[in-house]
Image (spheres, rainbow, N blue to C red):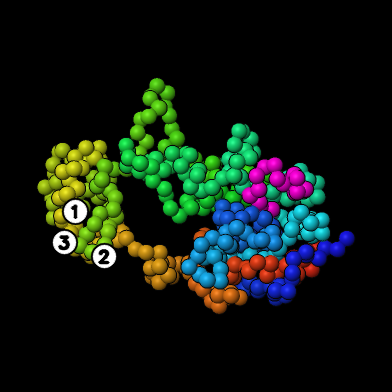
Amino acid sequence: MSLAPTHDAGNDDARLPVRSGPAGPLSGLRVLDLSAYIAGPYGCSLLADQGAEVIKIEPPTGDNLRKYPSTLEAESRAFIGVNRSKLGVVLDLKNPDDLAALMALVETADVLVHNFRPSVPPRLGIGYEQLKALNPRLIYCAVTGYGETGPLREKAGYDQVLQTMTGMCTLQGQRGGPPEILYGSVVDYYAAALVAAGVASALYEREKSGAGQYVGVSLLRSALTMQSARMVWAEGEPKDVGRDMRSGGITGLHPTREGHLYISANTPHFWQALCAKVGLPELAVDERYDSVRKRAQHSAEIVPRLRAALAERSALEWEECFGEDVPCAAARTVEDMFDNPQVLAEDMVAEFAHPTLGTYRGFTRPVQFGRTPGPEPFAAPTLGQHTGTVLASRGKGTGQG
């Protein structure tokens, strides 16, 4: 049986990216990323950041995230951002030859990640038990919407759907007001962190047992994990007790003469420092305002006076004035982070060479390791960019780990 890919390999890049630099904690490990969108793919990028060789396997139509709206003409900005440091392979798993090619990769893999609904992998021949028989050391991570059991097990999961279902949107809005979405795919990104953490833990356990195992991550688990401080219901108390942790309007975003400023003033020290800095020392000694609870009760009195004082300076000027005395930040744009001195000092922005974009700057190195910092990152792949080369070397490592 031929193991040649069924797609047009005319655009394959025979040259694999060379990962220069020191080894990472996961160097030498091979990860097969069959997932799409954000949670699974970014979890695999976090593994790639730590040195793992990650092979992104897409259907001939590509990861759906490639099709999302983008102000980049040639590529999806989201896809580029969540798929760094991966080799790109196209396989049609409904085609016997391509499925055989995947199985050859599974034999040499340490980790496989997918985000199919639970009933799909067994039908494709890539369920956990099926691949375990082929590679007993395989760490098999399934990212689902709602988990492997229960009435919603076959329901597809989406970030903002889970936000809305689990109460995140209700608590994001004002109490008694309409729910509000948290933009930025927060459930997906937290699930990605759970993927990386779960896989790493399973790899550690494999060093002791010699056996792989199933790792399950769901968007439902992610959304509720993010709300652990809210998911506490003590015996004897009513169900609706008010689980909002906001501080009554003092801590939060405020307008200034120019721009907005976030202020945190929950502790007595920070509250007193805030009052002194904005020229309202009388508020700091007023017994009506000497606790977070009292300030919340009297926020209608305090906030207008605070905002009138803040209107005397810009957000950046207040940020400098408050220094370490009052936790604060002037509201900036994400674009500002490309040249932020602290971000650059921490080496969190890299320049990537890309076949269609030329070069671009992007985020890298979410975790810093002292002895094994990991190799330099490289750009997300174009569709099927490395198919021919990866499959030609499927029985051995490609030198990327």
Residue at x-position 41% and y-position 43%? 169
Report if residue 385 is visible in the image: yes
Residue furthest right as drawn: 1
Q: Which residues are magenta?
A: 112-127
Residue furthest bottom as drawn: 358
Crowding near the residue tagged with mark 3, few <14, some 14–19, many ≥20 C-alpha atoms within 10 Å: some
> Is residue 121 located in the magenta-colored stretch of the structure?
yes
**Decide: marks 3, 1 in contact (CB < 8 A)?**
no
SS type, badge 3: loop
Q: CA distance from mark 1 to mark 2?
A: 15 Å
Residue under numbered circle 1 = 307
Kindly identify which numbered label has been placed on residue 147.
Answer: none
**Residue 341: % across, % down:** 38, 70
Q: Quadrant of residue 317?
A: bottom left
Q: Amino acid at mark 2?
A: Leu
Q: CA distance from mark 3 to mark 1?
A: 9 Å
Crowding near the residue tagged with mark 2, few <14, some 14–19, many ≥20 C-alpha atoms within 10 Å: some
Q: Which of 393/255 is in front?
A: 255
Residue under numbered circle 2 = 316
Residue at x-position 16% and y-position 38%? 288
Q: Which of 187/399 is in front?
A: 187
Residue under numbered circle 3 = 312
Nearer to us: label 1 or label 2: 1
SS type, badge 2: helix
